[in-house]
Image: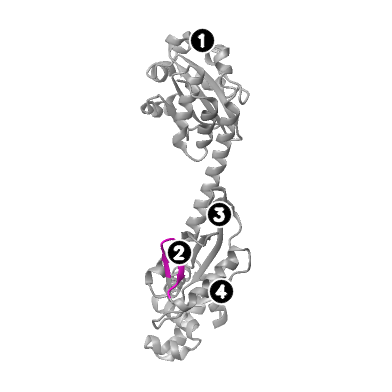
Amino acid sequence: MQRDTSSLIRRIYDAVDDVDALPDVLSGMCERMGGENGMLGILMKTPGPVPFAVLSGLDPALMPTLNARHLNNVWRQHMVTLPVGIPAASDSFVSLDQVRRTDFYGEILEPWDIGHSALFALDDMPTFHVAMSINRSTRRGPFTSTELEASQELLPHLRRAMQLRLLLERSRRQEKLALETLDKLAAGVVILDSQARVLFANMAAQEIAAAGDVLVLTDGTVRPRQREQCDFFRRLIGSAIAGGAGGSLLLSSSSPRLPVSALVSPLAGALALSLAAQGRPGAAAVLLSDPEVQAAASTERLRALYKLSTTEARVAWLVMRSGSIGRAARALALSPETVRTHLKHIYAKTGVNRQSALALLLAAATVARVP
């Protein structure tokens, strides 16, 4: 039984966010037009395989053969010249007898039991076409003008849904790239929605929480380990979510370690827009800097960037952290003269000649995580 138009239109828009709805949409188009199977996909304007294709009633095992040998088949040559949204019967530009004389028929159409097709250019983009075919066997004969017209009520909705889907996929790719980049940072990043629920926590933030002494990151929430800091932290988050300035807080620990600094700010920019496009609006970001963790990261980065020895990297870090050659020497069980000698080598390798400039290099070295 043919589905009513409104239910089929609803299913078309389901496909914006759910690719699994597309075979059902194709099935509905077949019911509407008297087809038996269908295909919807992207056809690149430069040589190359079909990057995206959805089938209904067709064996996907033939797709590798189609990609390898028959991308420029006789039907496609005409399909890509069609005006967008105007269907055409395959028999209107090439007869079945002509098609039967091609390898395309013997290797693709005959195994799929296809003799006739209604062809559509759903969209014409700068680098690709979005195309659809509704097909049936030789027994059913060519598509009639009445059957082609039966698609017209649905085609604008299908075109709009495919445009929205492409925009959503582009947004998701941008989001994935942004989140993967955040995972490379040595600083912790936690992204919160308007209800202060955690949408994302990068690897550095998860490691800070896993240490268990300054931060709790569980059940979709984030809070300081020390309860007396929780109220102030919540107020900072509330300010950022409301579009205010947010603020900063030193997250203390019961263990003898340096505190973790937390900066809470509103979330803006491309990542915020990408999340909002998917119905997951990010509202605030918590940036976490753990000097204990970043010390190890910075020494490794210094070694990699400036070819320092392990001892030279440790000397650089300890001198910067303590501000004293004497304290660095005691921490390393070295004499002050030995530390000064190491500093001379460090200056020579890094191209700086004073501790303040070395401190800038050290700060820059802590931006990224060390693999």
Q: Determine which residue is flagged by label 1.
A: 95
Label at residue 281: 3
Identified at 44% across, 89% down, the residue is 327
Image height check: is 110 above or below 335?
above
Front tag of 1 and 4: 4
Q: For residue 354, say whether it is visible.
A: no
Image height check: is 215 above or below 278?
below
Lateral position of residue 169 relative to residue 86, left or right: left
Instruction: State the SS at label 1.
Output: loop
- The quarter of the picture where residue 131 lies is top right
Identified at 49% across, 63% down, the residue is 190
> Around disc 3, counting alpha carbons within 10 Å, would you say few (fewer than 14), some (14 to 19), or many (20 or more)?
some
Instruction: Indicate which disc, 3 or 2, sits on the residue closer to the N terminus.
Output: 2
Front tag of 3 and 4: 3
Separation of marks 3 and 1 at Cα, in angstroms: 53 Å
Q: Mark 2 is on which residue type?
A: Thr
* Secondary structure mainly formed by the magenta segment: strand
Label at residue 221: 2
Instruction: Indicate which disc, 2 or 4, sits on the residue closer to the N terminus.
Output: 2
Magenta stretch bounds = 216-225
Separation of marks 3 and 2 at Cα, in angstroms: 16 Å
Q: Mark 4 is on which residue type?
A: Ser
| Pointers 3 and 2 in contact (C-beta within 8 Å) | no
Where is residue 61? Give x, y as percent: 36, 28
Q: Mark 3 is on which residue type?
A: Pro
